[in-house]
């Protein structure tokens, strides 16, 4: 039964008894392993390097983990790391004899490039993994590897997975295959591909959560008839300040090599 549960239910089952705690922990750990094995058979080695660099997996790969849906896994996995550890991680992956991965390309994003500002990255290095798939190492512009993830412009991609933890910024939406797009710019080929991937996996995309009646009915009506209701009390406003661990997010923190402890704080809407 636990194999068919969504992430919040699985985490709740861990707190119910020792038997389910062990079973749920094993499921989470096996899915973390399966995520990385999709890209390289030496998954333990790669997770060790990512852990040493405090790097996180983002993009559609992290979404696949949060949804527990392997079909969402893309051809290329996005990894985010801080400027302090970016070159170290690249060197570790390239020089590790167990991995046999050679750096393919490096793109340096200059401040003159608007794409760099939008994505909050300074550099992207690509490693072919030998099975027709790729790992992109994105170096963030700031000292937070999560900044590029929360700047994607679509809430469904505001998730991350590390060797020790994972987080989902909008579980109430994401786990129900709904997403907010801060700026639905179909002229941007990168974002357009993201929208296509989400919609092909059953996602509905809107600019405000009030577009769905179940959320609109939980908040006071708008003061002016031309305005949308404010969704900030439900943590579903794409423009409000948020952090992983606030009342609308899902965050799980565990020990190295296994997911042993969890913490999730959600509103009634999330449940």
Image: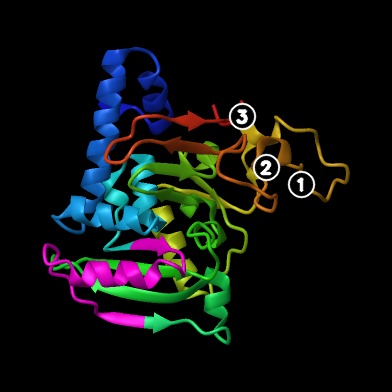
Image point 39% across, 82% down: which residue? 107
Q: Quadrant of residue 270?
A: top right
Q: Name the front one of labels 3 and 2.
A: 3
Magenta stretch? Answer: 78-106
Structural distance between the alpha carbons of marks 3 and 2: 16 Å
Q: Earlier in the sequence, mark 1 or mark 3?
A: 1
Q: Which residue is mark 1?
A: 228
Helix, strand or loop at mark 3: loop
Q: Which residue is mark 2?
A: 210
Image point 40% across, 26% down: which residue? 11
Query: For this rendering, which residue is in front, 127 or 53?
Result: 53
Q: Is residue 38 visible?
A: no
Circle on res. 267 = 3
Q: Residues within 10 Å of mark 2 (few under 14, many from 20)?
A: some
Percent x, y for residue 137? 35, 68
CB atoms of marks 2 and 1 within 8 Å: yes
């Amino acid at each position: 039964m636990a194999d068919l549960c969504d992430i919040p239910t699985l985490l709740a089952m861990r707190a119910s008894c020792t038997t389910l705690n062990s079973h749920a922990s094993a499921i989470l750990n096996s899915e973390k392993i399966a995520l990385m094995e999709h890209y390289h058979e030496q998954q333990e080695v790669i997770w060790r390097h990512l852990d040493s660099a405090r790097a996180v997996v983002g993009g559609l790969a992290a979404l696949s983990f949060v949804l527990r849906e392997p079909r969402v896994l893309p051809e290329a996995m996005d990894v985010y790391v801080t400027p302090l550890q970016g070159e170290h991680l690249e060197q570790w992956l390239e020089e590790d004899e167990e991995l046999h991965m050679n750096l393919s390309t490096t793109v340096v994003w200059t401040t003159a490039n608007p794409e760099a500002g939008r994505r909050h990255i300074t550099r992207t290095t690509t490693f072919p993994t030998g099975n027709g798939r790729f790992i992109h190492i994105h170096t963030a512009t700031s000292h937070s590897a999560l900044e590029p993830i929360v700047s994607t412009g679509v809430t469904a991609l505001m998730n991350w997975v590390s060797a020790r933890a994972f987080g989902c910024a909008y579980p109430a939406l994401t786990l129900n295959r709904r997403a907010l797009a801060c700026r639905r710019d179909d002229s941007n080929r990168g974002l357009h591909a993201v929208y296509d991937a989400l919609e092909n996996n059953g996602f509905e995309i809107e600019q405000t959560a009030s577009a769905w009646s179940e959320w609109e009915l939980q908040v006071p009506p708008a003061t002016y008839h031309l305005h949308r209701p404010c969704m900030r009390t439900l943590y579903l406003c794409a423009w409000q300040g948020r952090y992983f661990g606030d009342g609308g997010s899902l965050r799980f923190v565990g020990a190295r090599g296994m997911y042993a402890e969890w913490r999730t704080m959600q509103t009634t809407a999330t449940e």
